[in-house]
Amino acid sequence: MTISTTPLFRAENLFKSYHSGTEEIHVLKGVNLAINKGEMMAIIGASGSGKTTLLQILGTLDNPDSGELFFEGKGLSKKSERDLSRFRNRSVGFIFQFHHLLPEFTALENVMLPGLIAGRKKDEMEEPARRLLSQVELDHRTSHRVNELSGGELQRTALARALVMNPALLLADEPTGNLDSRSGNLVFELIHSLCKELSLASIMVTHNTELAGKMDSSSILQDGILQQV
């Protein structure tokens, strides 16, 4: 039997610039990375180094000036916006520094939301949403609304929401950045254990070098170049 060595996800030669007045700011200068199933990768760097821009491009929320993304060996640049939206919904989970939960919904309803957006029925989404909330230790908070949850509980709810569609790739932008050390460590340990349990590829932007050291690989984004450390 031949085992494929093709990475689950790969970025090739990404460039991105912005204009500020008459000045052109080069944020990414030929970034390359590859990640396999079950692998956790940290991207570290100073504030303003372009880490969030890179993560948004990896998640197809922004476009590079040039370069290509590959998922399961297939390029993404020629996909329509509709196809990219479907790709994000079904194959990519996102966790942000700010949870972006909808305040009018309960924790359970927020976790179910990606499936409902994809056209799945409420009855179909409730069981996996409840299971994930139990996995992130929130089975007792399913009916609570956003304003009734602590910061750590909000981020754990966001983690459950990111995983409810069984994505292959998890992208996390400073998911512990707004939490105290205890809550932050709990959220990270949950991300770590669930990624390993579900064989997810995970790319996490973080300022926390201690957390980065617990991942399979770490790279630093500096002067537009991504280098493994």
Image (spheres, rainbow, N blue to C red):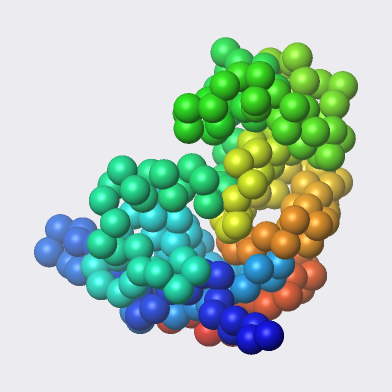
Image quarter in which the N terminus is found: bottom right
Tell how many labels: 0
Q: Quadrant of residue 70?
A: bottom left
- Please state if 63 lies on the left or on the right of 114 as rendered: left
- Please state if 55 lies on the left or on the right of 200 as rendered: left
**x then y, percent, for residue 6:** 54, 80
Q: Nearer the viewer, residue 83 or 148?
A: 83
- Please state if 40 lies on the left or on the right of 72 as rendered: right
Q: Is residue 55 above or below residue 42?
A: above
Q: Nearer the viewer, residue 36 or 221?
A: 36
Q: Nearer the viewer, residue 60 or 24?
A: 60
Q: Residue furthest front?
A: 1
- Please state if 109 lies on the left or on the right of 32 as rendered: right
Residue 127 in view: yes
The residue shown at (44%, 50%) is 87
**x then y, percent, for residue 139:** 85, 26
Q: Quadrant of residue 44?
A: bottom right
